[in-house]
Image: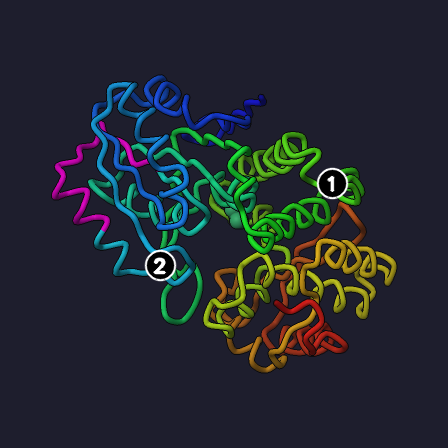
Amino acid sequence: MKTININTTHGYDVVISGNLLDKAGDYIRKSVGGSKAALISDDIVYPLYGQQVEESLAAAGYSVIKYIIPNGENSKNIFNYISILNFLSENHMSRSDTAVALGGGVVGDLAGFAASTYLRGIHLIQMPTTLLAAVDSSVGGKTAINLDSGKNLAGTFSQPDLVLCDYSVFATLTQNTYRDGCAEIIKYGVISDKELFYKLYSPINNQLEAVISACISIKRDIVCNDEHDNGLRQILNFGHTIGHAVELCSNYKISHGSAVATGMAIIAGAGAALNICSEGCRDEIIDLLKQYKLPVKTIFSADELYNAALSDKKRTGDSINLIFPTEIGKCVIKKTSLDRFKEIIRIGTVGTIGTEGVS
Ligand code: GLY
């Protein structure tokens, strides 16, 4: 078991361990107290783990209500957001009460947005059940829903009160969902931890606690330095600008991790062509992605990706911040004009248009 303290304006612990679900109630009571807990989950996760968490909450003295959304990115919408707000209100949840997000990134982002805006903020506990949510979205306080024009376009910065990461639940993930998390882990290696990157040549599942802890420690250092995403934090979005465009172009049929893998491959390709990184660095990134059977090619054209990427939050006026690797374990943020960005997508997608690894 490892506990990592995130020392943001509202500090909190991330507990990383196997077999945590039964202890959730006790952890939550110690962290936030209160009398009511709203468990927010999805229709795949709840049947597997919901009852265990409910029983743990009840044993710790909570009266529990639950709200279950359909699994999948398309649930991260304004209608579910409003429904959750109404649900919290109809159940007379007060500011001393707690929302418990049990699920992957969709559940965490949506529940987080609802919890941070209902009554101007109630307590929130993140209980990530996917590898991707464990290493990224459950930590750092970004909450969001998608709008028609793009991903995560409405949301808040609002840190949770506690993150309970029980990695024993990853045993029931599908291979594709597990791989999504691997893409985010590879991202951490590329942007800031060479040692982590090379560790990933050995299977992640034999070193889960160490790998998750390494990722969360990197995220802690970045988020504590730039909680509101004005500078350094943008490096966490390596591969994401084009990744979000791939997701949007596919109407979210391509998962976040797969899309980010393609985005990383495209940006690494452009980086090598522009001498920002070596061809060797590009090849190592692409080889590791392929080792995890992540897609490094896209069926979408450079024009389609460019148009979809225009709603990216790292865009300011006529420019956009792009994150390039400079070597394994290091990266740079480059402010780029939109014209140049279009060109960079074209350069990066040369040789990546196709279906290899596209699932
Ligand atoms: N997922 C990127 C961030 O939290 O900033």
Image point 25% across, 40% down: which residue?
A: 66
The image quadrant that residue 270 belongs to is: bottom right
Neighbours of disc 1 within 10 Å: few (<14), some (14-19), many (20+) = some
Tell me which amino acid carries mark 2: Ser
Q: Does the magenta stretch include residue 117?
A: no
Mark 1, residue position? 193
Image point 21% across, 32% down: which residue?
A: 95
SS for callout 2: helix
Tell me which amino acid carries mark 1: Asp
Which image quadrant: the C terminus?
Answer: bottom right
Q: Nearer the viewer, residue 50 or 255?
A: 50
Residue 225 higher or lower than 309, as above or below = above
Magenta range = 84-100
Image point 36% across, 40% down: which residue?
A: 101
User: Could you say where residue 56 lies in the image, as x and y percent from the top left?
Assistant: 34, 24
User: Could you say where residue 129 lies in the image, as x and y percent from the top left?
Assistant: 48, 41
Q: Is residue 92 magenta?
A: yes
Please state which of the two labelled residues, at mark 1 or mark 2, is closer to the viewer.
2
